[in-house]
Image (spheres, rainbow, N blue to C red):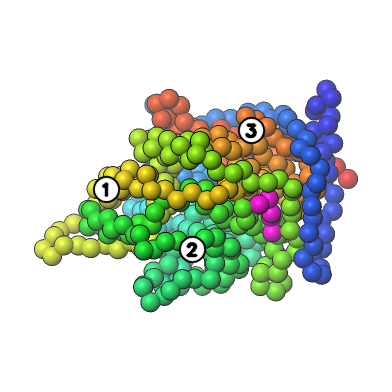
Amino acid sequence: MRPRCLTLLFFGIASCGVGSGDGPPRPARLDRPDFSIEPSVETVYTVGAIDGAPWETFGRVSSLAFDADGTLFILDSDAGHIVVVDTAGRYVRTISNKGEGPGELARPEGLAVFSDGRIGVMDFAKVGLQLFARDGTFLEGIRFATEAGVPGTPFHAMPDHSVVTAEVFRRSSAEDGPGEGRPIVRFRPEGSGELLYAAWQGPPPDDRRLEDVESGGIFMQLRPIQAFPPPLELGVLRDGRVAIVDSVGYRIKVFDPQGEKGKQVTTLERPLAPVGVTERVRDAERARRLALLDSEGEALQDVLTEGIAMVAVRRPSGASGGPDPAAMEAALRDSYRRQLGNMIFPDEIPVIEAIAVDWSNRLWVQRSGLPGERGPTDILTADGRYLGTLARDGLRIPSAFGPGGLMAYVEADDLGVQRVRAVRLAVDELLEGAP
């Protein structure tokens, strides 16, 4: 009983008040040593099958999101639709289908649920956000201008129905020159975008070593592979504040976009030093990436696309049909193998690998491990309280957080069959009633 009581004690701190954010940015150093916690979870349901109804035979689950009632929305990018299940995992409906017409999804990659219940899906084939009502009715499509920027994935829904993302695609030319930092952009419901924050750029890329790759009617220029790049992670709190990680050290910046643009409220820091990059670390990272080339799924796609500096579609004279992504993927694999020997390594591995915010406004901060290993995860509050650390082999950041301690994970078996498992963090039931 003692470990569970300690867990409740430290998670219970999260129900305390949060600062108003008035005044200058205030640092919050979390100097306490690691305190291990093991919160209990219970599996609520699992959906997905190798041989079942059409809705549950997933092709590629790319995104999950809960609404305020605990209903789960599952974006199957291969099928071009959203599967909706209730709080018990029972099938409710399927939203949309694969296609190019109004309300159809051609190349969906990201999903978010807004506070008013609308569902937003980023469809890259339509260069826009497709909006649906909770009952599946198609509402409208918001198209973005590639010159100004297009939100990538993941994107996060804001209380005012805008979206914020650190992944921004923009049509550029050689005359554009280098940008000022890595942009975190807020996109408004009418399709316009505004810079929320320019993140630390890190060492400038060496564009003198670009490699040209052309196949299947697609032309790309690739930068050298960079191991352990500076992180650019963000999470959105329920009140619209944005937590940003862009440093090699343990530093989280919390912004309030409701006031002055990019107004920094708090900086959260822990005295944890980055791990130095040794020859053993370099060898392990090369081996890890080489193994990914023989895999499939999102991990492979992330590796193949990380160094893209420019992409264009080139249809040869007299050729028919569109570009061939499969041919380009094969060419990218070959290029990647060649570049592994010249991979660029920094002196240190960034301390933080990922960050997420749950429905109780707690920050889940996953620390970096050595190549091929997962690091531990810290739980913090936005006003600078350290609640404890989850072991590296324990509970991890889910694909989606929901109300009442709900969390959803995308899992795959040995055959590659995807399933979605929803669990409940039992301690949240006590938090909701805490004074």
Of marks 2 and 1, which one's residue comes earlier in the chain? Answer: 2
Q: How many residues crowd around disc 2 within 10 Å: few (fewer than 14), some, or many (20 or more)?
A: few
Q: Mark 3 points at which residue?
A: 392
Q: Residue at x 28, y 58 (%)?
A: 212
- The mark lying in front, picked from 3 and 2, is 2
User: Going by the image, does 289 lie left or right of 217?
Assistant: right
Three-letter amino acid code at the position of disc 3: Arg
In three-dimensional space, the C-alpha distance between marks 2 and 1, rounded to whole angstroms, equals 26 Å
Q: Name the residue under label 2.
A: 204
Magenta-colored span: 249-253
Q: Is residue 163 above or below residue 78?
A: below
Residue toward you, 426 or 367? 367
Q: Residue at x 55, y 60 (%)?
A: 202
Give x and y (percent) for residue 200: 58, 63
Among all residues in the image, which is located at the extreme left?
318
For label 2, the SS is loop
User: Going by the image, does 342 lie left or right of 6?
Assistant: left
Three-letter amino acid code at the position of disc 1: Ala
User: Going by the image, does 309 lie left or right of 384?
Assistant: left
Three-letter amino acid code at the position of disc 2: Pro
Q: Residue at x 69, y 63 (%)?
A: 255
What numbered label is drawn on residue 136? none
Among all residues in the image, which is located at the extreme top?
1
Give x and y (percent) for residue 433: 83, 41
Q: Do the residues labelled 2 and 1 touch (CB within 8 Å)?
A: no
- The mark lying in front, picked from 2 and 1, is 2
